[in-house]
């Protein structure tokens, strides 16, 4: 069972893993696109999306929580100003992982991770999907097929 195992270990201790993710998210905020291995990119996606969500929240507590993860005042300012403004109408999914190649030497699968809706992105964002029109609920006597025999005479059946 995989209960309470939320993150990949990435072959590191927990302190080393969080140091790696903090460095990666700081570099991602600074450059807006980085290349790393696929498992690291998938773990980084969770942390980076959480940082953008804190930036959109914009409170002092959110700024302090983000400062515990992101290195550098300029990166922190970018999250709370530029990225928060860019994604103010977006409800999640701020990053994209694109598999690219196998690394020479150890054949590790590599991937780009980038923020969506930015200039010079590798792949354009898909347009938002419009939800279908709400369906009119059926009267109770029409909800089951076998109950149609009990429908009132004026129901049109």
Image (spheres, rainbow, N blue to C red):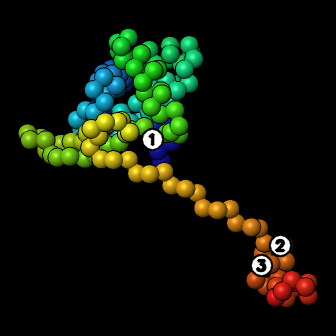
* Sequence-wise first label, 3 or 1: 1
Relative side of 106 to 134, left or right:
left
Q: Is residue 113 placed above or below 61 in the rendered structure?
A: below
**Which secondary structure lies at badge 1?**
loop
* Sequence-wise first label, 2 or 1: 1
Q: Quadrant of the C terminus?
A: bottom right
Q: Nearer the viewer, residue 73 or 18?
A: 73
Which residue is drawn at the image coordinates 15% and 46% (left, top)? 102
**Which secondary structure lies at badge 2?**
loop
Residue at the farthest right position: 153
Query: Which of the two marks, 3 or 1, is nearer to us in this view?
Result: 1
Disc 2: CA contacts within 10 A as few (<14), some (14-19) or many (>=20): few
Q: Quadrant of residue 155?
A: bottom right
Q: Residue tagged by mark 3?
A: 144
Which residue is drawn at the image coordinates 47% and 34% (left, top)? 87
Residue 111 visible somewhere in the drawing: yes
Q: Is residue 129 placed above or below 117 in the rendered structure?
A: below
Q: Residue tagged by mark 2?
A: 139
Q: Nearer the viewer, residue 78 or 1?
A: 78
Q: Nearer the viewer, residue 74 or 130?
A: 130
Residue 49 in percent (x, y) is at 44, 33
The answer to whether the residues at label 3 and label 2 have Cβ atoms under 8 Å apart is: no
Residue 39 visible somewhere in the drawing: no
Q: Residue tagged by mark 1?
A: 93
Q: Quadrant of residue 42?
A: top left
């Amino acid at each position: 069972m995989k209960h309470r195992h939320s993150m990949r270990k990435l072959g590191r201790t927990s302190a080393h893993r969080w140091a790696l993710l903090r460095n990666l998210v700081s570099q991602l905020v600074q450059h807006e696109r980085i290349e790393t291995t696929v498992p690291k990119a998938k773990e980084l996606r969770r942390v980076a999306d959480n940082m953008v969500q804190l930036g959109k929240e914009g409170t002092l507590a959110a700024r302090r929580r983000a400062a515990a993860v992101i290195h550098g005042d300029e990166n922190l300012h970018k999250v709370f100003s530029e990225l928060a403004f860019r994604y103010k109408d977006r409800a999640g999914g701020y990053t994209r992982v694109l598999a690219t190649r196998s690394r020479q030497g150890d054949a590790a699968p590599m991937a780009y991770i980038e923020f969506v809706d930015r200039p010079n992105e590798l792949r354009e964002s898909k347009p938002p999907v419009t939800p279908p029109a709400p369906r009119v609920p059926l009267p109770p006597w029409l909800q089951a097929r076998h109950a149609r025999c009990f429908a009132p005479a004026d129901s049109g059946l």
